[in-house]
Image (cartoon, rainbow, N blue to C red):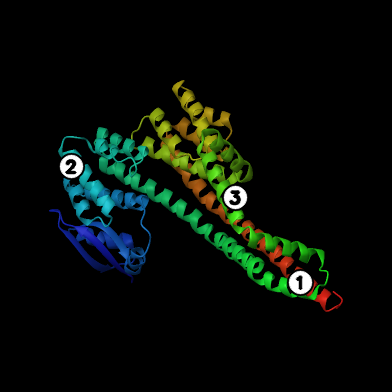
């Protein structure tokens, strides 16, 4: 039975840390609740050790903040006491200061959503609007629970994409480093031998030596040129027209994956907002913010216009023809049955699972393609050197 470490609080706000044996995190949480404590964080001990060496991010802090605040409010603690507890136990200095600032704003008479609005770098607009809807309906603890589910799902999706690209990235870096060593260190040694012998070299070897000499002599020009191209490209895609064209290119190159990513994001965001009581038009405007592809985001206004005209969202979505057919059918059924929010979340779950399969298929194609490309380049270098050696010793090749 695994050993779980936990951090919990009593009803008077005292923080308690300890360890407990349980089959899983759910069982551990139940045992902690039965002992009269409010669990804030539960983790297997080796995972905590791993987390100490992991890089922290504002998104990770936001997930932790939402999880812990949801647990405290769900246990019946008032908002100000819950925030005070979180400010004491926060491991991030930046998050601790932010929570204290929010707490001061609330004590000065601001609402929770107004206090969050003063920290836009940490709390996105969708987060603030969902909190505002929870405050208006008196169900802030429920909304925070849904927000926690939403943030965890998005985090899991990002981590899956990141982990899938680790091996191809390492492959490109190691392959590139190997080629650089061959061209800048190994080949120059052979070129000295070849020039001393004064023999004419095969054409591939001559091409290779020319490239090697150019890299060694003008490496700084190449470096500055590449940096200039990179900076120009980044500046270009920051412009509205450049970003749109770049996203259009990505749609052509990886249309299936891009559509599944954006469908999952849009549907999960819109479904979560609608379940939290946010009006449809406002929810559509918020959902537009999480769609990163500008080709698709530009079409959200058409959907909002259709909804404003009383046509719902299924018909406008079908007209723009950017979402997969299955998603359109499920959204249409959800609208007809009055369960649009539930169906949107089901669409998100469906395409998040499908996206993992699509990414796995894409990576399974990318890896051999990269290996083949690197192999061809390195093979050309090796064969060119061997051809030169054989020509010098006058052996048949």
- Looking at the rendering, in which quadrant would you find the C terminus? bottom right
How crowded pointer 2 is (Cα within 10 Å; few <14, some 14-19, many 20+) is rated as: some
Of badges 1 and 2, the one in the foreground is: 1
- Identify the mark at residue 286; answer none if there is no mark: none
Marks 3 and 2 in Cβ contact (< 8 Å) = no
Of badges 1 and 3, the one in the foreground is: 1
Image x and y of residue 60, in percent: 36, 53
How crowded pointer 3 is (Cα within 10 Å; few <14, some 14-19, many 20+) is rated as: few
Give the camera-side residue of 107 and 235. Answer: 235
Question: Residue at 59% of width from left, 33% of height from top?
Answer: 321
Tell me the quarter of the picture where residue 2 sits: bottom left
- Identify the mark at residue 104; answer none if there is no mark: 2
Question: Residue at 55% of width from left, 35% of height from top?
Answer: 295
Query: In the drawing, does residue 348 fall left or right of residue 388?
Result: left
Image x and y of residue 180, in percent: 62, 65
With respect to residue 79, does 366 lie above or below? below
Question: Residue at 45% of width from left, 55% of height from top?
Answer: 159
Q: CA distance from mark 1 to mark 3?
A: 31 Å
């Amino acid at each position: 039975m695994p050993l779980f470490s936990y951090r919990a609080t009593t009803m008077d706000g005292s923080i308690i840390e300890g360890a407990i044996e349980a089959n899983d995190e759910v069982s551990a949480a139940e045992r902690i609740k039965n002992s009269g404590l409010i669990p804030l964080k539960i983790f297997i001990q080796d995972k905590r050790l791993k987390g100490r060496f992991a890089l922290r991010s504002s998104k990770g802090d936001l997930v932790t903040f939402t999880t812990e605040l949801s647990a405290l409010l769900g246990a019946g603690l008032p908002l100000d006491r819950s925030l005070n507890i979180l400010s004491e136990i926060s491991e991030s200095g930046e998050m601790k200061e932010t929570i204290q600032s929010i707490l001061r704003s609330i004590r000065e008479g601001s609402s929770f959503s107004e206090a969050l609005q003063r920290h836009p770098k940490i709390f996105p607009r969708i987060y603030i609007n969902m909190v505002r809807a929870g405050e208006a309906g008196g169900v802030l603890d429920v909304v925070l629970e849904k927000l926690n589910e939403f943030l965890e799902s998005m985090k899991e999706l990002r981590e899956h994409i990141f982990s899938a690209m680790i091996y191809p990235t390492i492959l490109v870096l190691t392959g590139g480093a190997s080629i650089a060593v061959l061209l800048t260190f190994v080949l120059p040694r052979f070129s000295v031998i070849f020039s001393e012998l004064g023999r004419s070299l095969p054409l591939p070897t001559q091409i290779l030596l020319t490239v090697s000499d150019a890299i060694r002599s003008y490496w700084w020009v190449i470096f500055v040129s590449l940096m200039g191209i990179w900076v120009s490209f980044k500046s270009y895609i920051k412009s509205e027209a450049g970003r749109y064209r770049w996203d259009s290119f990505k749609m052509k190159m990886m249309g299936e994956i891009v559509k599944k990513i954006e469908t999952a994001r849009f549907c999960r965001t819109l479904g979560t907002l609608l379940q939290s009581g946010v009006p449809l038009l406002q929810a559509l405007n918020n959902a537009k913010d999480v769609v990163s592809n500008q080709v698709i985001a530009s079409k959200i206004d058409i959907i909002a216009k259709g909804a404003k005209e009383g046509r719902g969202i299924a018909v406008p979505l079908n007209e723009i023809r950017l979402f997969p057919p299955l998603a359109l059918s499920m959204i249409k059924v959800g609208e007809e049955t009055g369960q649009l929010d539930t169906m949107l979340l089901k669409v998100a779950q469906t395409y998040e699972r499908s996206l993992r399969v699509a990414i796995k298929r894409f990576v399974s194609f990318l890896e051999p393609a990269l290996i083949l490309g690197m192999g061809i380049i390195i093979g050309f270098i090796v064969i060119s050197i061997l051809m030169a050696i054989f020509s010098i010793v006058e052996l048949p090749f």
